[in-house]
Amino acid sequence: MQNERATGLTGFLGRVERHIDEAIVAGRFDATQRDLLLASAAQYRPRTHRNPLGDPLAVFYLIARAHRDELDEQAVELATFCSFYLLALDLLDDVQDEDLSGKPHGAVGTAMAVNDALTLLFLGLSALERTMRLERSPQRRMLYLKIVNRVALTTGRGQHLDLLGAEGARTPDEVLQMQREKTASLALVCECAALYAGVSDEEREHYRVLGENLSLLVQVLDDVRDVYGKPRSPDLETSKMTYPLACFLEHATADERARFDELKARLPGSLGELRKLLYESGAVRRVASAMERFRRGIHAEIAALGEESPTHRLLLFVIDQLVEGVYTPKPVPETAKLRAPRFGWHAHVQRLARDLSTRLSVFGAPPTPPLLPWHQPQWMYDKKRGVIYYPDIEGLAEETLPFQAALLGEPNLEEVARVMWRQAPAVVAHELFHHYRDAMGLLGSDMWLEELVANTLAIAYCAQYEPEAVAGGVAVAEQVLLRPEHALSPEAARALADLLDPERPLRPDTGYGLDFHQTALVQLHMIRELARAPESLQTAMQRLLGTRSVAA
């Protein structure tokens, strides 16, 4: 199967990557320097390709798309500037932290690294100059340069304070102020995106503050990950003052300080004990409190903008997931309306869930969990969060529909959306039956068995209440599975045969064992097979959920 069309965020990031490489190749550099620059630009791309929303330019895209339907050449130039600027600062930071080892410049030394950092910066300024030439508004044209100058000076001040080490920031407030200035480049990305989008000065200020809160949130989270997310803690081993450490030292007793000094002297072997000391001292709780302040600050700025944009909703989704590694965030009332849209496709999904709940009330069905739109093409019951995520095929069509389009061989995304609309009754039922199994303590870790159970129940339900969805599901399966590029791999064929074997033993904690494409194909084969002779709903509910209709 060919990769789905390069649309949405992934497509935009790909355009920027190509533009960066073209700018480097066109720079008439010596081959050795050209290769180093290309390697520097490419070093984070594998991570971006695995998780596009983790790229700093993702926030640029989400802000710009909140106000513009399409991102043009100027957006690519401006994002190219932002990327070069971030790469230059990262390389300089690596030089100053003596952290070039294992990176593209590790073998050539600091002199060449500094020179290439400056080169990356000037490549970025060239992209900024092209951005300004493409700007139609004379009032906005010079604002690009003013914003960059202001943020660059702010970043320089913060980096100086960081380099002072023990003579610099010591208290939590001082560390946050230093980090606010040092990490201002992410706020620059937000403000540049807002300027490109053509928003008012007041709205741009909201985005600037949003970016400042996001910068602090990411930096403090990085500080936590340095201690709790790595086998060794470079920050602790080099005595770098971070926010968690500042929180600890501000409240530590004399005994706790002495214990800290003792454990620090025995690093890296004592890292586990140091983690325990920081946690039990309350430092992590104070860090989480600060992170929550920044998270709520981001929500507040989005709420103040008053735009019910799907990309704003996606941005908040990303922010909330960021903090989950440290604490469980609660919904923010100011953005509750944005989180749960009520019209169009969203109303259709909610109505289908209500219908199912009403129809299955005679079986003692549990309350329906929240159904929330997201950016992925698949539906998913999230056991940990107790919610069902469904693809936002209206607001984020360019993110959610290309995979389905590639399966169907249908280039028209509007037609793909119509297919998904018609199939929604079966998919809503599938995910709700996962939830029902979970609520009854039956949901296991044999992933394929749970898919078989949910498909069996969903088809039984639809055969009784939504027969057109069953017929449509079979038609879609036939349409997809007839295409030669959708042949099952040997592994997928074995998984399907195994799954349909009535003597199949339980296989807990094994996962799907297939890529996303092959997993979808196995699901379609399963649906086609189960739809040949749907089980009665009464029988399926009793067999797979242990419930009987009170009317039976």
Image (cartoon, helix red, strand yellow):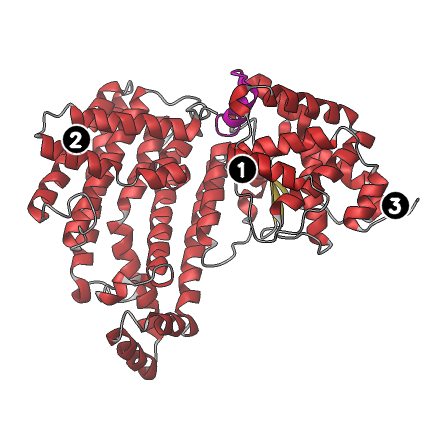
- At label 3, counting other C-alpha atoms closer than 10 Å, the crowd grade (few under 14, some 14-19, many 20 or more) is some
Q: Is residue 142 visible?
A: yes
Q: Nearer the viewer, residue 382 or 408?
A: 408
* Magenta stretch encompasses residue 292: no
- Residue at horizontal 23%, vertical 36%? 41
Q: Which of the two discs, 2 and 1, labels the residue nearer the N terminus?
A: 2
Relative to 189, residue 2 above or below: above
Q: Is residue 425 visible?
A: no
Relative to 250, residue 365 above or below: above
Amino acid type at image mark 3: Ser
Name the dominant secondary structure of the magenta segment: helix
Q: Nearer the viewer, residue 186 or 239?
A: 239
- At label 1, counting other C-alpha atoms closer than 10 Å, the crowd grade (few under 14, some 14-19, many 20 or more) is few
Q: Which of the two discs, 2 and 3, labels the residue nearer the N terminus?
A: 2
Q: Nearer the viewer, residue 110 or 60?
A: 110
Relative to 122, residue 411 above or below: above
Range covered by the magenta-colored residues = 398-413
The residue wearing badge 1 is 491
Amino acid type at image mark 1: Glu
Which image quarter is the C terminus in? top right
Q: Nearer the viewer, mark 2 or mark 3?
A: 3
* Label of residue 123 in the image: 2
3D distance between C-alphas at marks 2 and 3: 69 Å
Relative to 260, residue 519 above or below: above
3D distance between C-alphas at marks 2 and 1: 47 Å
